[in-house]
Image (cartoon, grey):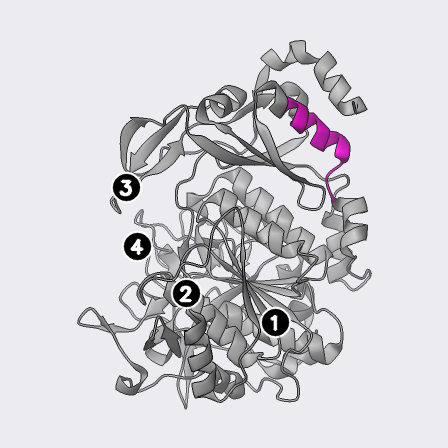
Amino acid sequence: MSAAKNTYLKSSAKFESHVELPGSFRKLPPGKNTGNTSLNEVIEVLVKLRRKTSIRNFVRSVGEGKNKPVTQEVFDRRFGASQEDIDLVVAFAGQHDLTVLQSSVSKRCVILKGTVQKFSEAFQVYMANFIPDSGIAFRGRSGAIQIPEILTDVITGVFGLDNRPQARPMFHLLKKDGGLIQPKDTSVSYNPDAVAKAYKYPRDVNGTGECIALLELGGGYRNTDMLNYFTKLGIALPVITSQSVDGAMNSPSTPDSADGEVALDIEVAGAVAPGAKIVVYFAQNTDKGFLDAISTAIHDKVNSPSVISISWGSAESQWSDQAMQNFNETFMSAAALGITITVAAGDNGSSDGQTDGKAHVDFPSSSPYALACGGTRLLSNSETVWNDMDGWATGGGISDIFPVPDYQKNITLPPSVNSNKKKGRGVPDIAANADSASGYNVLVDGQWTVVGGTSAVAPLMAALIALANQKLKRKAGYIHPKIYSSTASVLKDITVGNNITAKNGGYTAGPGWDACTGLGVPLGSIIGVL
């Protein structure tokens, strides 16, 4: 028996005393409460743990070029969870008849399995079933999670008690009369490699030796589509594999489902960096599934992704504080390991799809360690902010959660357009073509169509990073400090347009950084800065 477990058992008298897990409060879910979840239902819950030592200062030094990223082995020793903390949580689980499915020093987690009744008793929460307007029932909770006082400094988050849908894909299908529009019926659409050519991406590298991770919270792809797509483009078929996270699978269905997102991500990344291996991590669309997918990709010692593309998210107001802080910590892990994370900034302008009249930014793009990707409309003779003036527009704004990061302190950030006039992390960092009216030709479930959205920008940037890594013969990694401090002309400034969709207003493009397109559109020459 470990010393930690022995301490836990000797202290069992203290376990009657519970404390609130900071940041775990959740509002009632949307939809009709249909009553108690079956107490005998078996669920899985992810418990996130603290690090052995803080990682923040190390990541800052990596960004400043004072330290190099660490290997997975060094990361585990310095910044993983301690075995003593894992043992404490395992012992706590045993007291409540919960089964340990997995524990990980790297991912700083323990995954538990048990009945709703046992989890309700362990974390003192009430769970009920809800049916939203979509008609798809889920398990929800409200209020805060309680943990034993002895675990106050050990547990940083508990995920999976609530399995409400957490994020939405950031893609926009070009439609007419309710049907999908084919490329031949549009005035402007591009193959992804044509967009890369317009942005002068390097053509002497193709991503060979790199691995691009794509995170998907639904949908799927068909191998026949991939073969036909790249054959049509005259590009060698990339190596594409799927990986299941917590039981989620590659499950293609129809073109107007999340399959459109999956196809867009693979086909953009593969067309721009066909030499890179593409691994698609499928996870459940919950905060637990999302977080575990990111951790799994970051610490995948078999595929070793050097860049991760995320095209899913939701407004900061839709997340619990514990989720945002644990995601942010996980992104810091990526930075310490030299992994770049590109994230779509949202497709509904300054409102980010919320109906309260306020401006919102999308998370996880608002994490200071995510490269937030905004959207433009690219034409042959101009490039402007993407805003269709019908609610579809690039996301961007000022975070309500994260303070201004060091790399943004030397630029002029506007205050939030909301009444609080908050100054916080500015979103996005960069931008590229995203308007479906100048969208990407995609083959999904046997149908050719045109797709836009900032979803396209995340894999486009991920592919550029893969090209950079091959060219530089090292990982670009956490690039924010470098691109914000660069004086070279490696980004095309976008100065026309706005992303106003909220009643409170939004943001307008102008010279320099703005909350529509960030620093601008990265050109291939940015590799020299990285």
Residue 503 numbered mark, or none: 4
Task: Provide the secondary structure element on which disc 4 rests.
Answer: loop
Residue at screen point 28% across, 30% down: 33
Q: Which of 367 and 6 lies nearest the eye of the viewer?
A: 6
Instruction: Specify whether residue 404 is in view.
Output: no
Residue at screen point 70% across, 26% down: 88
- Residue for badge 2: 261
Disc 3 crowd, CA 10 A, few/some/many (<14, 14-19, 20+): some
Disc 1 crowd, CA 10 A, few/some/many (<14, 14-19, 20+): many
Label 2 vs 3, first from the N-terminus: 3
Res 429 quadrant in image: bottom right
Span of residues in magenta: 80-92
Disc 4 crowd, CA 10 A, few/some/many (<14, 14-19, 20+): some
Task: Provide the secondary structure element on which disc 1 rests.
Answer: strand
Label 4 vs 1, first from the N-terminus: 1
Q: Which of 258 and 495 lies nearest the eye of the viewer?
A: 258
Label 1 vs 2, first from the N-terminus: 2
Above or below, 9 relative to 515: above
Which percent across, then down, holds residue 47?
Answer: 59, 35
